[in-house]
Image: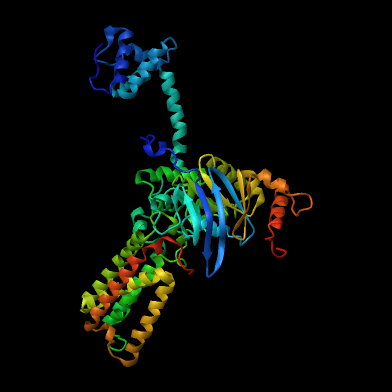
Amino acid sequence: MSGAGTSAGSADRRAGSRAGLSAGGADTAGGHASMRMIDDYARGDTGMATDEVWALETHLETCPVCRERLAVAATTRAPAVTALVDAVWSDLEPRLAATATAPRRRRRPAWLSGWLAPAAVPWLATAVSVTVLALLLDLADIRLGGVSLVLLLAPVLPVLGVAASWSRGLDPAYELTTAAPRAGLHLVLRRTAAVLAVVVPALLVCGWVTGVMVAQGLLPCLAFTSATLALGGVIGMTRAALALVGAWAAAVVAPAVAVSHAPLALRPDGLPVWGLVLVLGAAVVTARRGAYTVLGARR
Amino acid sequence: MTRAVSAADLAPTTYAWQIRATGLKVRVGGNRMAVDGLDLSLGTGVHGLLGPNGAGKTTLIRALATVVRPTAGSLELLGESAGGRGEHRALRRRIGYLPQEFGYYKRFTVREFVEYMAWLKEVPKADVPGAVQRAVERVGLADRADDRMKALSGGMVRRVGIAQAIVNDPAVLLLDEPTVGLDPAQRLRFRELLQELGRDTCVVVSTHLVEDVAAACTDVVLFAEGRLVFQGTPDELAAAGGPEHVGDSPLERGYSALLAGSGRERGSW
C-alpha cells in the first residue's frame, strides 16, 4: 500500500488509494484514483463494483486533484451528462436570480440591547434633545433667573431614562425581564450605566461649551440617578422618577425662576450634600438588591 | 460540531416532583391572600390549571416563576427552595415563563426578540442562534422570523411568547393563558406542541377553556379562591359531574359540580 498519508485523519485517502490499487496497480499515481476508474465513474458505468464506487467517492470528497480530473473526464467521456447538467443550470439560473438573496443585515446590534434597555431608548432621545435645546438657550443667553438652564436641568435628565429601564409601566416586557435569570441589581446597574454613558458626555460637552464647572452639573445628575434607583426599589421606578422630578421643579427650579437668583442647591458649596445623596442612594440600592428580582409596584 | 451529552444531562434528579408546594400562601395588594394554603405536587407532564376568574391562577404562576415571593409555606422547584430571598439565578435558567400580559418591543423582529430573551435567560452565547431558530420553528414562525413584531397578528405574537418561553429548553414551563388569541387551527397545533413538550418537561398551563384541558393535559388542577379543589386526570374530572350539573360537555359538568361542591361559586357569573 502506497501510504498516501501518515496523519491520523487520512483514512479516507488510504481507502481511495487502496481502491486504486485493487483496480489495477499499474496506473495508480501517488495515492490518487486511476484514470480508468474516473472514466468509468464519469460514464456512469454500471459494471463498477460497489466498494470501488464507495472508495472512489470517499476519495473524491477529500482530493481536489481527482475532482478536477473527474470534471475533465466528464466533459470528454460523458457529453450527454454534461449537456444535461448544463441544461438544468440554464433553466435554474433565472429562477435563482429572482429568489431572495442572503438575509438582510441585522438592524440592531445584540450588544446594544444587552446594555441599553429597549424601552429606555425613546426617553433617552428626549433627554438628549432637551439638553441640546437647553444648551442653545444658554448660548443665546436666555436664562431663567440668572441660572444656566443646563445646570437647572442636569439632575433630572437621566431620571426618566433610568426609570424606563426598569419600570412596570414604561417597559412592556417588564415582567419577562424580571423573571429572567439575568434580572437583578447587576442588570439594573448595567442599564443605568448605559443611560449615563449617553447623558454624561452630553453634560460634559455642555460644561465645556458654556464654561460651567463640570462637577456642578454632574454630581447632582449622579445623585438623582442613585436616588431614583433607591426610591424606585420601594415605590416603583416611574413613581420615583415623577416624585423626584416634581420635587426638583418645586424646590429648586420654581424658586430660581421666581427670585432670579442662583438656588442654593446649585452653588458650588452645595456639592458635598449632593455627594452624600449619591452615597446614601447607592447604599440603599445595594441593601435592597432583592427588590429588582420580584415584580414591583403597579405603574 | 454539536455538543455531546454533558455530565449535567446524565446526572440523576434529586427531587421527586418538579413543583412541590406545601401550605403555600401568597399575598397580593394589601391583605388579600390570592393563594391561601395550597398543597400541590406536580411532576413531568402537562398540567392544566383551571379555575374561575380571580381564583389566583396568575398569582400562583407568578409565584412559581419566582417573581412573587410567597408569604408563608414552602415552595420547592426542581428540588430547590424558591421561597426565600435571593436571586434564584440557576433555578430561573431552567424555567420558561409566558406571562398573561405578554409585552414585547414593537420594533424588534421576531428573531431579535427571541435572541434578546435568550440573552436575558443566560443561554450560552454559542447556543443562542440554534436555540432561537429551533424555538421559532417549533411555534411555526420560521417564515416570519425576520418580520418586525408590530407587523404580526395577535395569534402570532402569542406564539412568539411561547417561543421565548421555550428558548432555554426549560425543565419547568409556565404558560399563563397561552391560547388567548389563537384561532382554532393554531390551537390544535399548540396542543400538539404541549403534548410534545410534556414528555420530558413539567408544563403548567393556566386556562379557562375546558376543551384545552381535555385535549392536551395529562392532569387537571382545579383551583378556586386560592385553594386546591381537585387534582386528577381529565377523565376523573368528567366523572365528577352528573347530568344535573351545568355544562355542555362532561368536563364542563364535572367542573361546575366540583366548584359547586366546594361551596366557592359566588354569584351567577
Quadrant of the rendered structure where residue A73 is?
A: top left
Quadrant of the rendered structure where residue A272 is?
A: bottom left
- For the C terminus of chain B, the quadrant is bottom right
Does residue A208 appear left or right of residue B22 in this picture? Answer: left
- Please provide percent x and percent y for residue B47: 58, 47
Q: Residue at x 60, y 55 (%)?
A: B180
Looking at the image, can residue B164 be seen?
no
- Asked if A54 appears above or below B175 in the picture, the reply is above
- Please provide percent x and percent y for residue A104: 40, 49
- Asked if A196 appears above or below B210 in the picture, the reply is below
- For the N terminus of chain B, the quadrant is top left
Q: Residue at x 41, y 22 (%)?
A: A82
Colouring scheme, one of rainbow, by chain, secondary structure, one colour: rainbow
- Please provide percent x and percent y for residue B44: 53, 42
- Please provide percent x and percent y for residue A200: 27, 70
Does residue A281 appear left or right of residue A98 in this picture? Answer: left
Front-most of residues A156 and B247: B247
Q: How many marks?
A: 0
Q: Residue at x 61, y 45 (%)?
A: B219
The residue lying furthest to the bottom in this view is A259
Front-most of residues B139 and B207: B207
Front-most of residues A91 and A269: A269
Looking at the image, can residue A3 be seen?
yes
- Asked if B135 appears above or below B113 in the picture, the reply is above
Does residue B100 appear left or right of residue B118 in this picture? Answer: right
